[in-house]
Amino acid sequence: MQWNMFLAGRILFGSRVSSLVGEKAKALGGNRALLVTDGTMLRLGIADRIAEQLRAAGCAVSVFSEVEPEPSVETVDRAAAIARAEGADVVVGLGGGSCLDAAKAVSVLATNEGSAAVYQGLGLVTKPGVPKIMIPTTAGTGSEVTFTAVLIRRSDGVKGGINGDFLYPDCSLLDPDLTVSMPPSVTASTGMDALAHALEAFTSRQASPFSDMFAREAIRRIGKHLRVATFNGRDCEARENMMLAALFGGVALANAGVTACHALAYPLGGMFGVAHGVSNALLLSHVARFNAFASPERFAEAAALLGGDTYDIPERDGALLCADLIGELVADLGLPRTLRDLGAGIAKERFATMAAKAMGVARPIANNPRDITEKDCIAIYEEVF
């Protein structure tokens, strides 16, 4: 047994902790903040509230609200240019995983020259960025505790992460109250993203006793609370537990990595603009079935954590039950179940290109519990079609 442990900076969890953003920014030495967010946070008034809390603490604030659902290198480069020009000494990310990833990238680009595209890869960022505070408003990506910022290059449709220790946030404010405004479809897709992180980390070749603790708790909480959070969004217990599950899933993936589901999902986002959580939800049960016999004890345990009855059944059946339960969850949540359902113009003729791009997402492919080939990727796309 041999493994490493990585954790992000300070994490505060609870109702209204987002109101502490000004205090935490000043504690990190911030005087000029760049708030990185999107149009939804502006329309809901949440961005203005966070900006005012920063100003009340004595921080000058600029707001960049152009982050798109699948953030691009080009968008991050524009935000980073503003950060450099205005001398931002703290970056605050507010929103879903796209906003948080963009903010983390902007933080390191404020002190590292060049385009974000230069740093897509592992360990390519050579200098620390300015301090960064993350305020998630969805319960899914776990970006508030990971070392990755995933961006799309519009030039070639390739989706890749800036990965390295300098991407870890310095402070994260997890306020479940901010997730109440999420519509059911977003609650469902981001929750499935959290499940993908937890299950893939739990079955990864890099899993460890440390990552397993977080993955197990994330899977259990999602199995119990995601349906309620989706269909009764004002249930505070469900919202709190889903935000915890996303956090735990993020810690698990930061330490154990994800597997082939994420690799297969990347081309859907990069080539067709499909939301990341939707892509993972669509693929997760199929990849779980593909992997089941490579780690049957793990998938059987995951089935039990999801609420399945695995008592006194063969381990093989328990492993396959995991895939079935995920499929049932996706159906209950009303998320797309086939590539045709996406309406994104995805044709079978594109599967070979998609598979080649998926195989290029090297770390998740290497982490997968079962060896997977380009031919296998095509077969999974065909199965999902």
Image: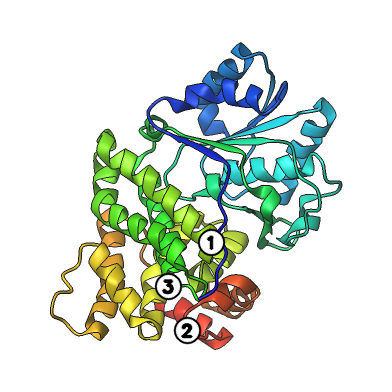
- Return the disc, 2 or 1, that comes first in the chain's sequence: 1
Kindly identify the residue that appears in the image at 29 percent across and 37 percent down: 233
Q: Which residue is mark 1?
A: 255
Q: Residues within 10 Å of mark 1 (few under 14, many from 20)?
A: many
Depicted 59 relative to depicted 170: above or below: above
Residue 357: x and y in percent read 64, 73
Residue 219: x and y in percent read 33, 59
Residue 123: x and y in percent read 74, 60
Q: Quadrant of residue 298?
A: bottom left
The amino acid on which the numbered mark 2 sits, given as a three-letter code, is Arg
Apparent side of residue 352 relative to residue 337 in the rendered image (left or right): right
Kindly identify the residue that appears in the image at 51 percent across and 66 percent down: 258
Depicted 322 relative to depicted 116: above or below: below
The amino acid on which the numbered mark 3 sits, given as a three-letter code, is Thr
- Closer to the camera, 142 or 211? 211
Apparent side of residue 36 relative to residue 308 in the rendered image (left or right): right
How far apart are labels 1 and 3 at the CA level?
A: 12 Å
How far apart are labels 2 and 3 at the CA level?
A: 10 Å
Q: Which residue is mark 2?
A: 370
The residue tagged with tag 3: helix, strand or loop? helix
Kindly identify the residue that appears in the image at 33 percent across and 82 percent down: 296
Question: Which one is closest to the eye, mark 2 or mark 1?
Answer: 1
Camera sees residue 340: no
Q: Are marks 2 and 3 in contact (CB under 8 Å)?
A: no
Apparent side of residue 12 relative to residue 8 in the rendered image (left or right): left
Q: Residues within 10 Å of mark 2 (few under 14, many from 20)?
A: some
The amino acid on which the numbered mark 1 sits, given as a three-letter code, is Asn
Quadrant the C terminus occupies: bottom left
Q: Please count the marks in the image.
A: 3
Q: Which residue is mark 3?
A: 203
